[in-house]
Image (tube, rainbow, N blue to C red):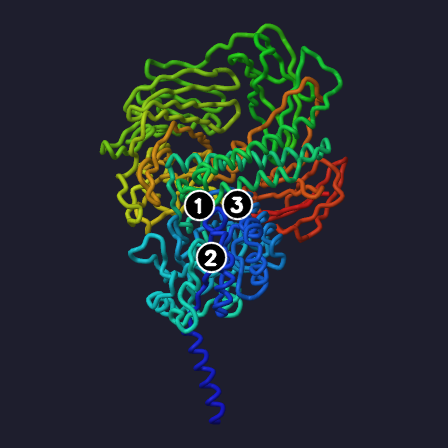
Amino acid sequence: MTRIYIILLAIFFCSNVRSQQAYFVDGYHGGIYGHYPVSWKTQFIVDQLSMHPDWRICLEIEPETWDTVRVQTPEAYQRFKNVVAGKQVEFTNPAYAQPYCYNISGESIIRQFQYGIAKINKHFPKVDFVTYSVEEPCFTSCLPQILKLFGFKYAVLKCPNTCWGGYTAAYGGELVNWIGSDGTSILTVPRYACEELEQESTWQTTAWGNSDTYLKACRDAGIKHPIGMCFQDAGWKNGPWIGSGKNTKNSSIYMRWRDYIKNVSIGKTDDNWYFSQEDMHVNLMWGSQVLQKIAQEVRVSENKIVMAEKMSVMAYLMNGYSCARADVDEAWRTLMLAQHHDSWIVPYNRLNKQGTWADAIKRWTDQTNVIADKITELSMQSFDKGNGVVDKQQKYIRVYNTLGSERTEIVNVLLPYEFVDMDWEVYDWRKKKVGCSVEREGKQIRLLFEAKVPPFGYSTYCIKRKGLGKKIVSRSVKVNDNEWTVENDMYKIIFDLSKGGIIKSLVAKKEGNKEFAKQSGEYALGELRGYFYEEDKFHSSTETPARMIILQDNEYGKKVRIEGEIASHPFTQTVTLLQGDKCIDFNLTIDWKKNVGIGEYKEKSWRNNRRAYCDDRFKLSVLFPVDLCSPCIYKNAPFDVCESKLDNTFFNTWDQIKHNIILHWVDLAEQEGDYALALLSDHTTSYSHGQDYPLGLTVQYSGPGLWGPDYKITGPLTIKYAIIPHRGKWDKASIATSSDRWNEPLLYSYHSSAKLESMSFVDLQDTGYQVSAAYLQDGKIVLRLFNTEGDQTQRKITFGMPLSSVEEIDLNGNSIERKKIEIHTGKTEMVISMPRFGIKTFVLK
């Protein structure tokens, strides 16, 4: 009996000691672009691990770093290879350039992991990837699905020592099941509900050093195995962060994340956290001109490379053309580097002798664009086999659609000088006449016609000389000296020039003639408004009259230019309506005379909790007061759409950050009614909205900001955006599809001779799916689909060619399932299902 009592007492004592034990995850973050002193760092890591055998580290090092390390310090590189094969090191973020994730496309995130994993495994073949953990808030709501498809088992939502740009919401205890946008679950260490933001700090949470206060809060919250974390900057010459051996703070035990979660933690939980994109509390210098340009450059390159890959697939299937894989890899490489989190948070920091991060991003995205344009052009040229007959009286235009759904849109084609002073007729591939408009534009002519292009395919049109050109008669109506009406089959818009060209009335004809413009109130639709703190006052574009110039006015296209002023600085805004197009396009340019301060006040210290560059009501914004009843916000995110739960987007301190980011679009929709207005942006930025404040798109901030630099106005501002008045919820109104069309416009090529034909290679029909990517790899076609607007019922996909097999794979390329296919009249059909916001990848043979 005494022996049993002693055994039970020993078990109780050991269990109690373990429950009081603290743990810590240490490591390094950085790389060849973001702080990694190549001359000494690798050897330093090896030496420190040898000196401290109880030390464990996690590494978040840019994969390309190892190329340089191998060349410049080969002995240290070889010793490091031996070390990583052991139990002291874990690689926790293989992403190629450590992107924030929430500010780029879902497809970009996948490529970051694919290229990064391949690079690391090229150097360290035995390294596997089990836990995703990062130093900065490099998270987004779709990550559980992506991580699982790459074979990850665990994730960590902490970033305790580098929260300059934000942090995740505090939630839960020791472990949670992080539920992603599609429903995928991954076992996760959260930023605990008791893990508060550090007092007297604007970049840390309490978990950064395993303090007594932090550990007590964890135990009071019932966390049996509390753990802290710090990924040190790779440029720091520190070894174990909280001491070593007997001197380790609070006798903490160093762990790798995989070992802690598997062997120490409670191991499983019933706490399911349905992580919303609004649980990302992140804030950058939105509206600053430097960040605005970076975001635009990245968006352009994202669109171009994805479209180029898709075009190369069409050319391969039709003509056997194959683009050089090395070119595609290099285009993605430079784009991925431009997506590096440092480029967005410290754009003014010097990257190397060639300049700042902002300078590098311009070079990198330019390189991506050159390669992508070349691939697209060569893909189109591969179709140029003609029909063997050249007729000077007729030419051909082939129109390409990179999306998986059919499109009927106005194509805007610039034709060479030889077409000037001639009138032309357009015929489709069935030799059926298509309506068109021809206008002279300098030494070229602009041809507008309605093209119907099948899903992921192309259509060919013939243009024939008809005779002398006809004069285009203006159809816009001047109501009085101050008002103009611009109207087409979709909308009737009244511009009030006495108030800077604001939209006084916006009637959507196809939506029950609904009037969208709010007819009363403090703000006006299309108004530019911001606080110029040097003058201590708000300025609005409504303060100065504007003038209007008609640029295009025919059945197919309406284009007007409004010229006005904001605080004495001239601006022009071009507004475009196209027949049958739900989008109303805007192109805004402000020709700043000089740098001026715009924001809540002039920032004194970026280390303050109170910050001048957070509250978007004070930044220059374009406003959209619309006549909607109690509307709420929906906003897209990478592989997700989030229903906002915020009462408003307003905050002005680091510890109260709210998610106010527009990636591609936001939709302002009535909660009980049926009307909504979607806003599309050509770059990632912020938006504003509140109960008594209209939807606003951030246009300009100017003043001191994060990390100290003065984020000045250095030249003209140019942005593009669009609005879509509509009925129904965003998915029923196909807003995501409209956004895809806006970002991936129809492409066209001009030919002296061509075969009249129309072809579809991938038809997603009415599935609500999108073609996230299609590219060639090892002689096979990789097709990735994303369910953005559909449900999880079984759906039919049609391929416009006979296939021998279709295999579903994970993101590492491993087989998941061989799909059942049926071939009918030269086409292949496949039935699949996936949840809303799910992604699936297929190999077509």
Would residue 693 be found to the left or right of residue 13 on screen?
left
Counting residues from the start of the chain, the first of labels 2 and 1 encountered is 2
Counting residues from the start of the chain, the first of labels 3 and 2 encountered is 2
Tell me the kind of residue under disc 3: Phe
Within 10 Å of disc 3 (Cα), the crowding (few <14, some 14-19, many 20+) is many
Q: Secondary structure at mark 1?
A: helix
Mark 3 lies on residue: 639
Q: Nearer the viewer, residue 686 or 125?
A: 125
Is 537 above or below relative to 395? Answer: below
Tell me the kind of residue under disc 1: Asp
Mark 1 lies on residue: 342
Q: Nearer the viewer, residue 632 or 593?
A: 593
Tell me the kind of residue under disc 2: Tyr
Q: Please identify the quadrant where the C terminus is shown.
A: top right
Mark 2 lies on residue: 28
Q: Secondary structure at mark 2?
A: strand
Would residue 334 be found to the left or right of residue 482 on screen?
right
Location of residue 9 in the rendering, given as x and y in whole percent from the top left corner: 44, 86
